[in-house]
Amino acid sequence: MNNVDKFLALFSEFDMIVIPKERTTKTKKEFNVTATQVSQAKSDLEKELRRLTNEYKRARRSFKHNKISRQELFDFEWRIHELQEEIRRIEEGDGV
């Protein structure tokens, strides 16, 4: 008995009704962003990146002392990566 048959046997009492949703086409909204807003956003992200980098350094020390888990340390690394990607997009003009 494969997994599909097991699933169907366990949930044979349930009926599944699928109703198609009406699709509406929305036009992509264009945002008018000034150069000042772009530079402000970039500086805010860089400030957040510096703060998070310092927090990451403290988290690495905590990890060495077994106070936080590897997953928590990875979360810090991932957030730093996300901020770096956002800054890169702004510099390239994709995030605007």
Image (cartoon, rainbow, N blue to C red):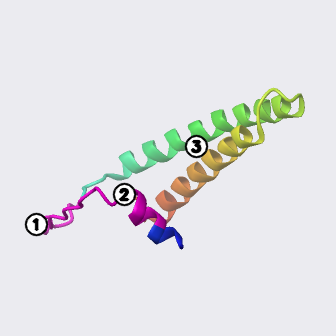
Quarter of the image for residue 61 reads: top right
**Of residues 8 and 63, the one drawn nearer to the viewer in this rendering:** 8
Q: Is residue 58 above or below residue 94?
A: above
Question: Foreground mark, 1 or 3?
Answer: 1
Whichever of callouts 2 and 3 sits on the residue coming sooner in the sequence is 2
Question: Foreground mark, 2 or 3?
Answer: 2
Question: Residue 78 lies in magenta, yes or no?
Answer: no
Amino acid at circle 2: Phe
Question: Residue 17 lies in magenta, yes or no?
Answer: yes
Q: Which residue is mark 3?
A: 46
- x then y, percent, for residue 71: 71, 42
Q: Residue furthest bottom?
A: 2
- Provide the residue span drawn in magenta: 6-30
Which mark, residue 22?
A: 1
Whichever of callouts 1 and 3 sits on the residue coming sooner in the sequence is 1
- Quadrant of image for the N terminus: bottom right
**Of residues 82 and 91, the one drawn nearer to the viewer in this rendering:** 82
Amino acid at circle 3: Glu
